[in-house]
Amino acid sequence: ATIGELTVDNCHIINGAVKANTSQGLMIGAASSDITFKNCSVSGTLEGTTNCFSGGFIGGKVSSNTTYINCLSAVKITGNNQYAGGFQAYNGSGGKNLSFENCIFVGEINVISGAAGGIFGTKRNTGTVTMKNCASYGNISAKGGAGGLIAGLEVWGSVTAQDCVVYGNVYSA
């Protein structure tokens, strides 16, 4: 089914677990519709087995806008991931705007390959990235690049981060 626009409000996944070799998230594996998450949280584990996209809320996202408002991610992501992120692993292939406001990551990401970020992994496209009042308390380790907030950007649009902080340890080997 195709969904034009989706709003998820006050939804919580507690102690979820996913093990996959494709796009995986505790709420959505992969999506191409506009999505807004409001007052939502996820906790649990994601294990990537073969170059997958692992994100607390969404694994892979294309051709659309994604907004997170007042959300919490307390996930542990491990394994062989191409991209990993506390909220979202990947936004590309025509993906548009990505926005985070008042969002907190308190989990742990440890991937043996690929890139990982506390808020999101990698964004590739022409849309904007906006982060306001976000915090990452998680420890992040990745061999392909690691960031407390963002692992990688290939953006031909604007990137804005306002009043965001990182308290966790970040390692890139």
Image (spheres, rainbow, N blue to C red):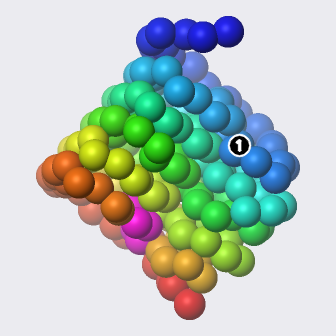
Q: Nearer the viewer, residue 54 or 135?
A: 54
Residue 57 forms part of the magenta stretch: no
Q: Which residue is mark 1?
A: 24
Q: Residue at x 62, y 43 (%)?
A: 59
In this picture, residue 34 sits left or right of residue 42: left
Q: Position of residue 107 (x, y in %)?
A: 58, 57
**The furthest residue to the front:** 93
Secondary structure, mark 1, is: strand
**The furthest residue to the bottom:** 173
Q: Residue at x 52, y 38 (%)?
A: 61
Q: Position of residue 43 (x, y in %)?
A: 65, 42
User: Mark 1 belongs to which amino acid?
Assistant: Gln
Residue 149 forms part of the magenta stretch: yes
Is there any visible trace of residue 73 in the rendered image? no
Q: Nearer the viewer, residue 141 or 121?
A: 121
- Name which quarter of the figure residue 11 lies in: top right
Q: Position of residue 136 (x, y in %)?
A: 40, 59
Question: Which region of the structure is painted magenta?
Answer: 147-152
- Name which quarter of the figure residue 152 lies in: bottom left
